Amino acid sequence: MSRIGKQPIVLPDGVTITVEGTKVKVDGPKGTLEREMPPMVTVALDERTVNVGRVDDSRQARAMHGLSRTLVNNMVVGVSEGYRKQLEIVGVGYRAQLRSPAEVELALGFSHPVIVKAPEGIGFEAPTPTRLVVQGVDKELVGQVAANIRKIRKPEPYKGKGVRYEGEKVVRKVGKAGK
């Protein structure tokens, strides 16, 4: 039995979940999320808990059991608390400027500013010009948007300039030795 898959998911106050066949829909104070579950996984509702089970003990069903439970749990946490990814911008003249909650302008050393538009359900925050916060209810989407922003200018190994996740360690290389 999957150690993660057999744990029940406790629903916080204000969160409701509906299951229609293989489709799971979670409503909460921050938003709504929907996901199609694999056919070899069952989702059962109790009073304030959700249990994820599997139809049989095939290899595929065992593989999907823990994954499906984690995906449903991420949906519950997302609609109740939300997710945030914080990015640091390092470099002289590198900065982020908010145009709107769904659009940010980045100056990253290119000849032009880079404008990033957020997809539906994602918001940006720029507490300082060198910090950018990506937030939303879908954990997968928040992580993907943050990774796309980081990909625009990855931290380079010599001076460490670029966009990195908060707390990320950049392995530095030694430059050319002078005479």
Image (cartoon, helix red, strand yellow):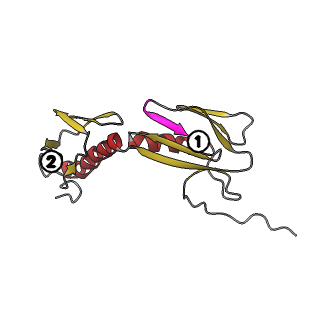
- Residue displayed at 14% across by 42% down: 45
User: Dividing the picture into quarters, in which one does residue 30 lie?
Assistant: top left
Instruction: Mark 1: give few (<14), some (14-19) or many (20+) Cα within 10 Å.
Output: some
Instruction: Mark 2: give few (<14), some (14-19) or many (20+) Cα within 10 Å.
Output: many
- Which residue of the protein is positioned furthest toward the bottom in this rendering? 179
Q: Position of residue 71 (x, y in %)?
A: 29, 45
Which residue is disc 2 drawn over? 54
Q: Would residue 22 be seen by someone viewing this image from the given angle?
A: no
Q: Nearer the viewer, residue 78 or 12?
A: 12
- Residue displayed at 33% across by 36% down: 29
Which disc is residue 2 wearing?
none
Q: Quadrant of the N terminus?
A: bottom left
Q: Quadrant of the C terminus?
A: bottom right
Determine the secondary structure under disc 2: strand
Residue type at the position of mark 1 = Ala
Which disc is residue 126 wearing?
1
Residue type at the position of mark 2 = Arg
Determine the secondary structure under disc 1: loop
User: Dividing the picture into quarters, in which one does residue 176 lie?
Assistant: bottom right
Q: Is residue 149 above or below residue 176?
A: above
